[in-house]
Amino acid sequence: MQSLNITARVTATINKHSMLTGGDTVLTGLSGGPDSVCLLHILNRLRGEYSLSLHAVYIDHHLRPDETSGEIDFCGSLCKKLDVNFIVRSIDVHSHIKEHGLNKQEAARELRYKVFDQTANGINANKIALAHNADDQAETIFMRLIRGTGPKGLSGIPVKRGNIIRPLIEIERPAIEDFLDKEKAGYVVDSSNLGTDYFRNWLRLSVMPGLKKRNPRLISSLGVTASILQEEERYLDIIVTKTLMKLISRKTADRIELFISPLEGMDTVILRRVLRRAIEATEGLRGISFIHIEGIIGLIKKGKSGDRLYLPKGVRIIKEYALLTITSELPVKIREYEMAQPCDVTINGASMVIKASMEEKSEDYGDGKSSVLLDADKVSFPLKIRPRKPGDFFFPLGFGNRKKLQDYFVDEKIPRDKRDSIPLIISDNEIVWIAGYRADERFRVTGETKKFLRLVILKGKS
């Protein structure tokens, strides 16, 4: 009997992939469609065998208001009949689209998985069962192939990921429909699945039927391919995990630093995966695409220390002498300070303290960068310390000609994201010293200087 056959096949999948153990609390997604209804019926049959506590959640996407109430009523009645705890949750897809610039399917998927996690946590469910089937797997592989992907993308939908399990992943859609028909189990039809506006629907309705005629075993063949690639991905993941553990110097939610030397000599195949894993593990960096990974590899292999890449969403890649820094942290902009004489001023965000002191005549003029000696009679106290402003200019010491600060930063190859963290020492709205870089010609010491001002950079905490 087909219904017994599909239950046995699902049980075999569950056991093969160790999806369930005795006493699990399982939250299953229930839309009312044939796949989720089939999954709920089968899990209900397996309750006793696995001692399951079973719950179902319907997620209202607020995209089909004319159909939602009917679907909720159907799912609620089904759960009541099967004695399954029924939960309804809502998500605001349209707001998520506006906030994050995603398409409708991406936004719905992000929110849906977030709700699954939140709901599971709320009822202490240790497993989330989703109803993706073998046809979904085949369609996903084709979609990714058409859009462009690597081996990981071609491995399709994972059978198991964290606490998410997919018991129907080896069951084809006709078997599911046959099961529901023989069991006289009703289901609802999502009208959005009937048109070809969405890429997956177009593939499912217009392309897959023709391919199945050419190869009647297409779905199972692609399932085997996905299984092989998933096994290879798991093996490579172990290698990548071990490699990455040795590479990380420092990591926060929006920044990761990797030792550069091992990366420079690493094979590109592993390097791609290491970078991808590092980025995926850092919350503020997710969303970097393949083309960006290739750009990062180019920076690692061919770039010089100090070279940078600027990627979308404010992500910056910085190649330093010993480290590769990948960060989406907002560039620091220092605030304004006043500087009396003598004094020490801590510049928050610039990792420095600037010390001002008066000196007798000295032959030590400083290096102009970390220490500078100036004519104290040419400045007006209190001095100000501030970040750059539009229109700033100065007269570089040793050159004398007027120069826009912006042009100076460009000539000195000072990265854009560092420019607002560079302290400018100001006297009567004139730049006296670009701390760490160059003083102004107008305030230099001459043979006529009577009073001397020493400005020195001391290292401090940011």
Image (cartoon, rainbow, N blue to C red):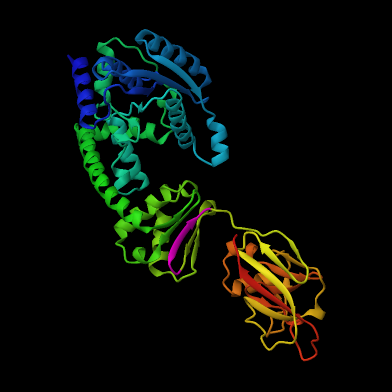
176 vs 430, left or right, is left
Q: Is residue 459 above or below residue 329?
A: below
Image coordinates for residue 158, horizontal then vertical, percent: 30, 37
Quarter of the rendering containing residue 334 = bottom right
Q: Which residues are magenta?
A: 321-328
Image coordinates for residue 354, horizontal then vertical, percent: 67, 69
Image coordinates for residue 347, horizontal then vertical, percent: 66, 62
376 vs 5, left or right, is right
* Residue 327 is inside the magenta segment: yes
Q: Is residue 376 above or below residue 384?
A: below
In-front residue for pair 180/462: 462
In-front residue for pair 410/105: 410
Residue sitting farthest toward the bottom: 447
390 vs 115, left or right, is right
Q: Is residue 56 above or below residue 298?
A: above
Quarter of the rendering containing residue 166 = top left
Quarter of the picture containing the N terminus is top left
Quarter of the picture containing the C terminus is bottom right
Q: So how many labels did they put on this image?
A: 0
Q: Residue at x 21, y 28 (%)?
A: 15
Q: Residue at x 25, y 11 (%)?
A: 182
* Residue 44 is inside the magenta segment: no
Quarter of the rendering containing residue 117 = top left
Q: Residue at x 58, y 54 (%)?
A: 330
Q: Residue at x 26, y 44 (%)?
A: 234
393 vs 84, left or right, is right
Image coordinates for residue 245, horizontal then vertical, percent: 35, 54
Residue sitting farthest toward the top: 81
